[in-house]
Amino acid sequence: DTEVTQTPKHLVMGMTNKKSLKCEQHMGHRAMYWYKQKAKKPPELMFVYSYEKLSINESVPSRFSPECPNSSLLNLHLHALQPEDSALYLCASSQEWTSGNTGELFFGEGSRLTVL
Amino acid sequence: AQSVTQLDSQVPVFEEAPVELRCNYSSSVSVYLFWYVQYPNQGLQLLLKYLSGSTLVKGINGFEAEFNKSQTSFHLRKPSVHISDTAEYFCAVSDRRMGGNKLVFGAGTILRVKS
């Protein structure tokens, strides 16, 4: 099983809503990532979790709140978003680099978010 | 900080023709290099990677890339493309000194294969 599964695939929300994006992997990876991809742009790193602890936060606004409940799950809680936050949100996982592994990122298909 | 430049935003090519997608990165010191492909409305899939060793790297779907340290380049090539290769291709770099977790992507190159 080499899949990273993201739900929902599509989400439409108003600026006052609270919603969550979910990501799950069963490859035994200990690093998990959230990327944001705007249309016709490359993915931009938001957060990295390593062994369920937040290791990188790329100065993301607090209206995005990540959570890693266990080694297989990664959530992104959304609250009071703006229309410019509309994008494809990609989750990825990898083996932990420090163990000498290649660290190849495996991506999910993404959750397409529209903020009205 | 590492940066990646993909020199062509779009590359049109006829089916069965060869193609090269260009990628340059900012430093040749302690980097890992990757090419990912993204089909419409999908996530990213790894095509190939350079970690160390042989400078010619072979990947999936008949793609290969060559690491050139002196020119800080990692160009992607395929000798004969198919319609199904139409997609966006991203070159990416990570810095070994930073633990490798932080992958920086280039702006992407859209490959359009015409019949």
Image (cartoon, coloured by chain):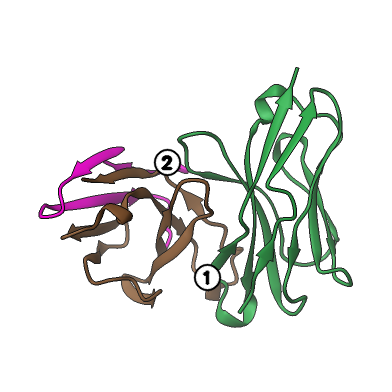
Chain B representation colour: green
Q: Nearer the viewer, residue B10 or A106?
A: B10
Q: Is residue A92 above or below residue B88?
A: below
* Label 1 sits on residue: B102
What's the residue type where badge 1 is placed? Lys
Q: Which stretch did the figure color magenta?
A: A1-30
Distance between mark 2 and mark 1 Cα atoms: 20 Å
In this picture, residue B75 sits left or right of residue A108: right
Chain A representation colour: brown
* Label 2 sits on residue: A109
Q: Residue at x 69, y 31 (%)?
A: B112
Q: Residue at x 50, y 51 (%)?
A: A106
Q: Position of residue B7 (x, y in %)?
A: 75, 55
How dense is the environment of label 2, judged by Cα within 10 Å: few (below 14), some, or many (20 and up)?
many
Quadrant where the image shows the N terminus of chain A: top left
How dense is the environment of label 1, judged by Cα within 10 Å: few (below 14), some, or many (20 and up)?
some
Residue A2 within the magenta-colored segment of the rendering: yes
Q: Position of residue B63 (x, y in %)?
A: 77, 41
Q: Position of residue A19 (x, y in %)?
A: 16, 51
Pointer 1 chain:
B
